[in-house]
Image (cartoon, rainbow, N blue to C red):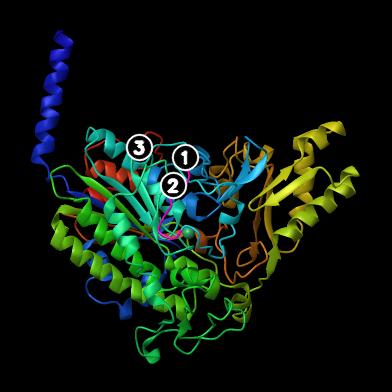
Amino acid sequence: MKRFGALATILLLGATQVMAAAEAPRLVLQITIDGLRGDLLDRYADNFGKGGFNYLRNKGVVYTNAHYLHANTETIVGHTTLATGATPSVHGMIGNVWYHADSGELGYNIEDAEAPLLPTRKDSAEGAQVDPAQKRARSSGRSPRGILAPTFSDTLKIATAGKAKIFGISGKDRSAVAMAGKAGTAYWYSTNNGDFQSSAYYMEKYPNWVNVWNGQGKAERLADKKWQLLLDPARYKLGDQDDRPYEIDLKGYGRTFPHPFGPANHPLFFTRVLISPEGDHLLLDFAKTLIEAEQIGQDEVTDYLSISFSAVDAVNHFFGPSSLENEDVVLQLDRTLADLFQFIDKQVGLDKTLIVFSADHGMAEMPEYATELGYDAGRIYSDEVLAMAREASDAIFGSDKLVKDFFRPYLYLDGDAISAKGLDRQNVATAIADELAKKTGIGGAIPVSRILTGNPSGPAAAVRYNHHPQRAGDVYIFQQPYWFMFDRGPVAAMHGSPWGYDTHVPIIFVGSGIDPARVGRLVHPIDVAPTLSALLNISPPAAAQGTALVEVLN
Ligand SMILES: [Zn+2]
């Protein structure tokens, strides 16, 4: 019992120290901007107002050289990394899509047949699905069950004995679900009907406030309206570059301003709304309603709200990151954030709110644009990679059946076909990888045997951080810098490579007791969750690999 007494004394001392430290925030607000590359805030800063990005930039510790460690810079991978402080090799979200061992089929990252979507207002409405990752989902159910590491939000729930209120909301399901973790509640926008929806993993039925919000039909009110520029074109850096032939015209949405949403019954109407500042406006409106209805930040227990804005990424994919559309959606997001911060100040108090801001990945320039600027780039499509792999397999082993599929970034081999020929799977992978690595546009093709050995650096190290043994394929394939490697379809620009424009994101912390600073040293998004934990005097998430950022803690 003597030992217990000593421990109690230490615990009491610890408690006194905690109480002497700054009062815990009432709210941790985690803001993630899908696809906001690390350079874009500085690029557009001249036209920012006072209360949005500049609130963060002037009051916070701003990291200007933050890079993801993993190679597959996609939405679920980045969000889960921010949430858990772990790399995909540990948290298991290695890509938007991978071969699921249960059925040997491609599947979507957060799909879960046992967690069906809860029906919203007009469940029968059928919007056209343009998200290529969503098309691979084998069921419409969604849950965080496939995430293999606890999130910061999960850890906060434990630290507060279950009392913290935890929510993740977004224009995209995977961005909401990853951040809410297993202990929180996620809501996301439906491109079928403009409602915010959730799944049976989280609740049996929607709380009344969600039904009321959906019942207002706020997205439909944009019918026959247009996305207009916020400012006079002369004020934009890219004001004279609205039209480029390689931007995507989404069946009448156009390549130049103004972009018409069309009638509410157009199959792409709710998708177009998401590919505009209006998608972020709707998310802001839903966030405000949630904060009031769920009484977020109203008592001493620290609550957690993650808001992941999706419009920048959507706009990037159709118009590229160096487009007038990109500049405008970022400027309009600046005003959206100013509105959010004003609302939080009134409801909770910004002095009682700890804000952490980042992005899930960056974005490559369109290869045609890079080529115009003198860079050597092009497009290589998934079916071409698969065909090259089968050709190599046929030439070396006398059969193209050894290659099962390619879904970027992984090539998958057919284990049965390889055994039937008496071959060794790793040898087959290595031989095909070595052939693929020689092809134009391919930056690297790394077989599992090489991912797991040696002391890799550069992209090879990033590939190892991405490698989860039960989920990864046989060969990791990535493109040369500025090359586009993805499926055919209406996609102008992509992210997903291990190169700097895709790994570079902003990280900013703002809160009571945090002194403003601009920090240029290399840091990583795995550091975000451990830093939040240190600020709150709680344990970091159980699988976190990052370190708490000293500039924030000082
Ligand atoms: Zn994303």
Q: Residue at x 47, y 36 (%)?
A: 148
Q: Viewed as shown, does residue 312 lie left or right of 450?
A: left
Q: Which residue is mark 1?
A: 147
Q: Which numbered circle lies on residue 80?
A: 2
Quadrant where the image shows the N terminus: top left
Q: In this orientation, does residue 356 appear?
A: no
Residue, disc 3:
541
Q: Dot 1 lies on which element?
A: loop
Disc 1 + disc 2, Cβ < 8 Å: yes
Q: Residue furthest top?
A: 1
Give the image quarter of residue 480: bottom right
Q: Badge 2, how many Cα within 10 Å: few under 14, some, many 20+?
A: many
Three-letter code, disc 2: Thr
Residue 116 among magenta residues? yes
Assign a secondary structure to mark 2: helix
Q: Identify which residue is drawn at 37% across, 75% down.
A: 221
| Residue 464 visible somewhere in the drawing | yes
Answer with mark 2 or mark 3, whichever residue precedes in sequence.
2
Q: Position of residue 246 (x, y in %)?
A: 62, 79
Mark 3 residue type: Pro
Question: Where's residue 227, x and y in %?
Answer: 42, 80
Residues in magenta, as a range: 115-122
> Vertically, is 270 above or below 387?
below
Task: Tell me which secondary structure the magenta stretch mostly adopts.
Answer: loop
472 horizontally vs 269: left or right: right
Residue mark closest to the camera, 1 vs 2: 1
Q: Separation of disc 2 and disc 3 at Cα?
A: 12 Å
As helix, strand or loop, the secondary structure at mark 3 comes to loop
